[in-house]
Image (cartoon, grey):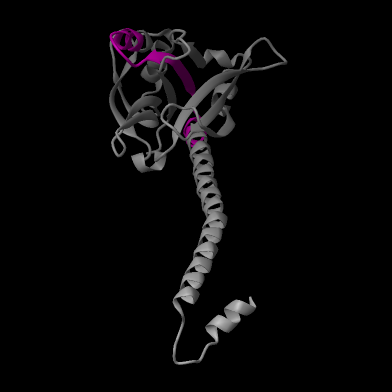
Amino acid sequence: MKFLKRLFSKRNKAGFTLIEVVISVGLMGVLLVSMTLFITPVLKAASENKKDNRATILAETLESYIDRNTKYAEYFAVFTGVAINGAQRTVDLQNMYQSEALQKFRTFMNDNSTKYQVRCISINWQMDQRTNQAKYMLNLNKVADGTGGGYTISKVNPVFDDCFYEALYPTINIEQVISKTTALPAAALKISVDIFSDAEMNNYSTRGEGYVSLLNVELNASKNPNERMFFNEVRTPSSDELTDTYIFYITRNTF
């Protein structure tokens, strides 16, 4: 320290010697390297915290959106295990459209068509146009009349812009809640959202978990909510297979 003080307090006309300049540069280099070694982990931790926060927001938003839009459904049907690749997709969708659940939707709508409307939320494996990478995304689907007393999906619209999923890869799992106090299934769903930070879904970031209590289904179905709630696994997928999930529900018109 005394050397540096003496070095920078020189007032002679000769200025600094070459040795002094070399020593000064070397000391400054050591200081810069030390600062870099200290700052780099801090910046990395801040970046990881930011991504974790975004992952938490994404998980909570996806769960909250499904909860908010389906809570007051009159009829409710979930289809899981719907194939998304190859010829199997057509078969799976056809089975879904002609299912007993959607036929009951049709019966209800025929009697109450002016008061209610059919809606559908889907969780689809699709391409993120910004990054050209595939991932699960939440979509709204326009429901059209189908054959065999059911419905079909005529248009798919994303709920959120692609940038909302940037560098994050969600999976959404929906399970029917079974009451512990009765043999009958309760009119409730458990929604689990896992967020990963890589396309291979190896680097786990966070989990969001919530429950949807279908208040009108429980109320209108009296002691057996399964009369208005249908949880259908189209088929059992293999562990590494990608599948879509479709949530059909009937809600009151808001206009």
Residue 41 covered by magenta stretch: no
8 up-or-down from 174: above or below: below
> In the image, residue 210 lies at what x, y percent?
59, 31
**Range shown magenta:** 65-94
Residue found farthest to the right? 181
Decide which of 139, 85 is in the foreground and name it: 85
Image quadrant in which the N terminus is located: bottom right
Residue in the image at 45% along x and 16% along y: 80
Residue 82 covered by magenta stretch: yes
Decide which of 94, 105 is in the foreground and name it: 94
Residue in the image at 54% along x and 61% along y: 35
238 up-or-down from 48: above or below: above
> In the image, residue 152 lies at what x, y percent?
31, 18
Q: Is residue 194 visible?
A: yes
> In the image, residue 153 lies at what x, y percent?
30, 21
**Is residue 69 toward the left or the right of residue 178 in the image?**
left
Task: Tell me which corner region of the image, top left, top right, bottom left or bottom right, holds residue 131.
Answer: top left
Task: Tell me which corner region of the image, top left, top right, bottom left or bottom right, holds residue 176.
Answer: top right
Decide which of 220, 184 is in the foreground and name it: 184
